[in-house]
Image: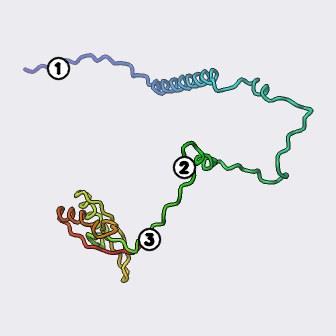
Amino acid sequence: MSRAPKSRPTARRPPAKSGGGVIVGIFIGLILGALFAAGAAWWFTRSSPFQTPQGSVSSRVPSAPDQPPVSLPGKPGDRPVVKPDFEFYKILPQGNGAPAEVPPAPPVPPVAERLYLQIGAFENPAEADNLKARLALAGIEASAQRAQLADGRTMHRVRIGPFAKPEDMNPVRTRLADAGFTGTVVKASP
């Protein structure tokens, strides 16, 4: 015995009117925002202390109708004389406590050769950067230099220096040995 399901009366709602309520709201909001911004700009510029009243500009300029205009130096068509803006170079040495004249430093004789510790030389620049990074992790600052060989190949040298004397290299060589690197002394002319 089965029963037939009862049918329920369904209340039909009228379809919702989509008259563009969201779009109208955005449009009204934009108009109100623009009016508010214009009003704020007018209010702040009206009470700005940096603006001068309209009538006061003409009151500052004295009127002298009976005097001829002041002539400027030079001939018509000449370029105007420009005063240099860098007067502080003349003023600074004359200040209080400044030495009258500093004698020039004695010339340093040019170094004939510079000494480097070369850690490696690679054709691939990525390998040179890798070695340079491993040295940096060990606390040693190195530089990668690019050199063109006679046969046309490009080598990337990883070097530490320059050093003035071989004795200056000894502390760096011990740090290199402690980190597991070996360096070769290379002489380079300037």
Compute the Cα span from label 1 to label 3: 110 Å
Q: Residue 110: give its label.
A: 3
Residue 107: x percent and y percent? 48, 66
Does the rendering let one see residue 126? no
Which residue extends farthest right? 66
Above or below, comparing residue 83 to residue 109 in the picture: above
Residue under numbered circle 1: 5
Amino acid carrying label 3: it is Pro
Compute the Cα span from label 2 to label 1: 113 Å
Q: Residue 140: give its label.
A: none
Sequence-wise first label, 3 or 2: 2
Residue 52: x percent and y percent? 69, 25
Would residue 7 be found to the left or right of residue 114 on screen? left
Q: In which image quadrant can residue 57 be found?
A: top right
Would residue 15 be found to the left or right of residue 121 on screen? right
Residue occupying image coordinates x 85% and y 44%: 71
Q: Dot 1, crowdedness within 10 Å: few (<14), some or many (≥20)?
A: few
Of residues 16 and 51, which is closer to you in this image? 51
Q: Dot 2, crowdedness within 10 Å: few (<14), some or many (≥20)?
A: few
Residue occupying image coordinates x 32% and y 66%: 161
Which element carries disc 2, helix, strand or loop?
loop
Of residues 83 and 94, which is closer to you in this image? 94
Q: Residue 99: give its label.
A: 2
